[in-house]
Amino acid sequence: MEGVVLQSLVFANFLLVFLFNLFTHGFYFSLVASLLATLCLYAFRVYDPESLKNYNEQLVRTTVASVISLLLTLMFTNGAFAHSLENLLLTVVAIPPLNFLWYRIVLKRQPVKRYLVLGDKKEFWHILKEIEEKSFGKIRFAEFLNPSPAKLKAKVDRFDAVLVTDPAYEDLVADLDKSKVEYLPNLVEKTLKRIPVEVAQKFKDYYQVSFENARDDSPAKRILDVFVALVGLVVFSPFMLFIALAILIEDGRPVIFKQKRIGKNGKIFVMLKFRSMRNEEKMRARFVNDEHHRILKIGRFIRPFRMDEILQFVNVLRGEMSVVGPRPEQEEFVRIYEKEIPFYHERHRVKPGITGWAQLMYKYSSSLEEAKEKLSYDLWYVKNRNIFLDLRIVLQTAEAMLWRRGAK
């Protein structure tokens, strides 16, 4: 239900911008301006529930998105600056209050869905609590039951749905209305957009089949990779020249940092980056958080905006990486994680990426526990990957760079 409500909000924003421009600037400009404005609003997470509930957050994100939209509109409309400026003012003035009111009136009034949970409360309560928080209380786990058929039959009609948290209980819900039965993996993935490792372990058979069927070798993905890589190298070429000169002046050669990383199917490849740290011999792999003392002055500027990663477009053209995918990790860390974290090897079923779902949704990991948490987002991406998800991640990467979120 929430998805439909948010889609209608996106359409309402598009329609507002389109109709405003249609009566003043003609069909072509209206269509281009409204499409670009909507894409930029989406890319900068204006429609995330977390942003909708906070007016200041809504205003800041809408303003940044509108400025980017203005620049793009100028490119596609032969420099219609006055019209583009009017479009920017409209979105900044009208969109935040409209969206904020929409959240207060529509989203916030959605009915609460109460679940009867089949399983041990202690086992998954931390995940269920996260789901309640993520849904802003619209999902509630009202009662837990270590069931017998008689108890389940007596209680089921008091709740909106039954949540199965253990495959062992599948036979108990076989005779229930299928529309009232939901399984933990489905609810977790739909709400949290990640696959916690403990859930994958509990539903091991299901996830093994799902990951075995994962594919990332579609022609559409390769076309997107080549197109984005070529455009990226052209657009960022002036920045690349500046960064290279700055590194050379500050700390000499080499300008390019080369490091072996683990790619698809566990194959080793050489990843390229602009060097952002001083030359220093390392005896072992270390987390970036342990190496702050080595960061160059130019590194302190390019790293938060991920500008040191631009050279990886070359890795993409070589076919070693994709624009979107799990970040490639150092071999030493991979060997540790594969021993300590179940399902870690599944992230290598697809090509590593310059950006990815985990980079958008989670911080840089600097411990085993954080690596486990971050893996949950990579697993969700591997299982649910498609060209539309890749496009979404590409669009929202600009927001992640400006908000300085995610990992290196």
Image (tube, rainbow, N blue to C red):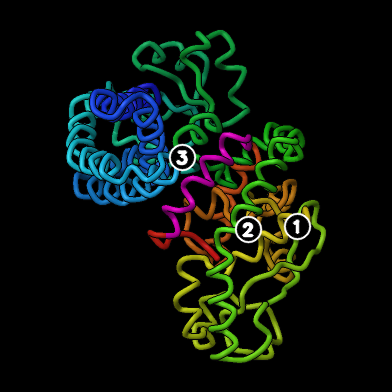
Mark yes or no: residue 252 visible.
Answer: yes
The image quarter in which residue 14 lies: top left
Q: Determine contact: label 3, label 1, CB under 8 Å.
A: no
Q: Which residues are magenta?
A: 384-401
* Residue depicted at x 49% and y 27%: 118
Instruction: Give whichever of discs 2 and 3 has the lower sequence position.
Output: 3
Residue 389 in the magenta stretch? The answer is yes
| In the rendered image, the vertical position of residue 269 relative to residue 219, given as above or below | below
Q: In the rendered structure, which amino acid carries the disc numbered 1?
A: Gly
Earlier residue among tags 1 and 2: 1
Which residue corresponds to the image point at 30% horizontal and 24% vertical from the top-left?
A: 15
The image shows residue 300 at horizontal and vertical percentages of 46, 78
Could you classify mark 3 by the number of other residues whose Cα lies within 10 Å: few (under 14), some (14-19), or many (20 or more)? some
Mark 2 to mark 3: distance in Å?
20 Å
Residue position marked by numbered label 2 in the rendering? 327
Q: Which mark is residue 5?
A: none
Give the amino acid at mark 3.
Leu
117 left or right, relative to 249:
left
Q: Which residue is mark 3?
A: 192
- CA–CA distance in space, label 3 to label 1: 26 Å
Quadrant assignment, res 208: top right
For the residues labelled 1 and 2, say whether their Cβ atoms are less than 8 Å apart.
no
> Is residue 114 something that shows in the picture?
no
Can you identify the residue that label 1 sits on?
Answer: 263
For residue 84, side relative to residue 247 (left or right):
left
Q: Amino acid at mark 2?
A: Arg
